[in-house]
Image (cartoon, grey):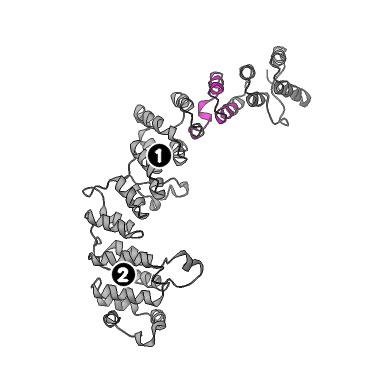
């Protein structure tokens, strides 16, 4: 029964379907008339039958429908309506399970619908459907994920990556409930890869671990939930990630045995990051284009103080690293610079020559002149002794 109906006949058939006249449609088909409406009629008879929820009419139309694209469109419609009975009917007449992204099925929250698609070969990898469902916090996707992964080891690696990506995401969000659920589902907090932001998925520089995400957010409760293993986890890397966040997280990692000085030259990468953080200031200082005050950088400064008191050394490897810290300090009020020099000098956290190099720039001398001409030309040692 190929061929298009005329626009008039197409409208007539659609009207029969819309008014639920099953026997009239049956006679139409028995008479050998086509059911393919012309393109200018936007809704097909099958579409109208789906809207009515008329099971017998749907079966009548799908039985005589030759176009797979129409069957597949109807299948997507049935999933959207959460009508498993329609899904079963359409698949029995040739609609393709794989034409509907599994993520759309998972987002229905319907366990029986999910099971139907998984049992019949739905694509569990393309588009990372379980990762999408986890991001949307679809709890009914968890058990099917676990059971399918166990039953299909050939897909285990691809499925594992989806759960791991979701775990990284929720560690960044600090969502303890979903962190717990994903750990139950077998997500690995130590695997390295992208989070759920597909923009950076192919950039290894942006890859991370759930443990690093927890540290970088300074969420101590999440970090404890992930259960760091001091014997196998890279505590120095985690300490460096935590250096941009909270004093409490730093203290926790140090209590587990993290080394303050992890660089080959005896310096501290965590301290490097804290010094760099001084240039961030606060949202207010950034948007109002003013220098950061002691209050603005108090969080970063407390982390710097803690690391230095625990023996951290600032050991820049070249002039570029010194310039980077100097550039950060230009964003701070002069009093912040002086306090930092005092802290570094009094604790012998770096050679005096390094501090002299930090201060030995015309712009830095000009920057410090706001505290009075008497500071210009002062050595770090003399500067650190001033109150």
Which of the two residues, 147 or 227, is positioned nearer the viewer here? 227
Q: Which quadrant of the rendered structure holds the N terminus?
A: top right
Instruction: First in sequence, mark 1 or 2: give its number.
Output: 1
Q: Quadrant of residue 12?
A: top right
Q: Position of residue 266 (x, y in %)?
A: 23, 65
Would you call the spot at circle 1 few (<14 residues within 10 Å), some (14-19), or many (20 or more)? many
Q: Quadrant of residue 358?
A: bottom left
Q: Residue at x 27, y 83 (%)?
A: 382
Q: Position of residue 368 (x, y in %)?
A: 39, 81
- SS at circle 1: helix
- SS at circle 2: loop
Relative to 223, residue 139 above or below: above
Q: Is residue 203 magenta?
A: no
Query: Could one spot residue 99 in this view of the protein?
Result: yes
Q: CA distance from mark 1 to mark 2?
A: 41 Å
State the predominant SS element of the stretch in magenta. Answer: helix
Relative to 233, residue 24 above or below: above
Q: Which residue is mark 1?
A: 162
Q: Residue at x 51, y 26 (%)?
A: 97
What label does residue 318 carry, if any?
2
Q: Is residue 35 left or right of residue 226?
A: right
Q: Which residues are magenta?
A: 74-103
Q: Which quadrant of the rendered structure holds the C terminus?
A: bottom left
Q: Is residue 34 left or right of residue 381?
A: right
Q: Is residue 77 magenta?
A: yes
Q: Position of residue 351 (x, y in %)?
A: 24, 74
């Amino acid at each position: 029964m190929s061929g298009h109906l005329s626009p008039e006949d197409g409208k007539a058939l659609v009207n029969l379907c819309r008014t639920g006249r099953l026997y009239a449609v049956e006679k139409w088909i028995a008479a050998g008339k086509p059911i393919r409406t012309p393109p200018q009629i936007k809704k097909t008879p099958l579409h109208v039958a789906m809207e009515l929820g008329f099971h017998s009419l749907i079966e009548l139309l799908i039985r005589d429908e030759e176009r797979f694209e129409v069957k597949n469109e109807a299948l997507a419609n049935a999933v959207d309506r959460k009508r498993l009975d329609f899904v079963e009917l359409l698949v029995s007449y040739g609609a393709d399970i794989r034409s509907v992204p599994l993520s759309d099925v998972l987002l229905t929250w319907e366990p029986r619908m999910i099971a139907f698609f998984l049992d019949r070969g739905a694509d569990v990898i393309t588009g990372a459907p379980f990762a999408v469902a986890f991001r949307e916090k679809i709890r009914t996707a968890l058990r099917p994920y676990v059971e399918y992964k166990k039953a299909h080891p050939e897909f285990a690696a691809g499925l594992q990556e989806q759960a791991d990506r979701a775990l990284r995401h929720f560690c960044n969000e600090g969502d303890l409930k979903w962190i717990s659920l994903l750990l139950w589902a077998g997500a690995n907090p130590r695997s390295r890869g992208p989070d759920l932001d597909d923009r950076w998925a192919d950039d290894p520089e942006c890859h991370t671990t759930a443990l690093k995400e927890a540290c970088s957010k300074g969420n101590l409760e999440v970090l404890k939930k992930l259960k760091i293993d001091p014997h196998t986890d890279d505590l120095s890397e985690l300490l460096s990630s935590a250096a941009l966040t909270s004093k409490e997280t730093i203290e926790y990692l140090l209590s587990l045995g993290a080394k303050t000085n992890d660089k080959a030259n005896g310096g501290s990468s965590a301290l490097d990051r804290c010094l760099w953080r001084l240039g961030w200031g606060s949202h207010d200082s950034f948007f109002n284009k003013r220098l950061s005050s002691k209050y603005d950088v108090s969080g970063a400064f407390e982390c710097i103080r803690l690391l230095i008191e625990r023996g951290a050394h600032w050991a820049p490897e070249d002039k570029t690293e010194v310039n980077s810290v100097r550039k950060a300090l230009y964003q701070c009020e002069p009093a912040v610079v002086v306090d930092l020099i005092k802290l570094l000098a009094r604790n012998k956290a770096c050679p005096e020559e390094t501090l002299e190099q930090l201060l030995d720039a015309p712009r830095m001398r000009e920057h410090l002149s706001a505290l009075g001409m008497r500071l210009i030309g002062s050595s770090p040692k003399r500067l650190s002794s001033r109150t």
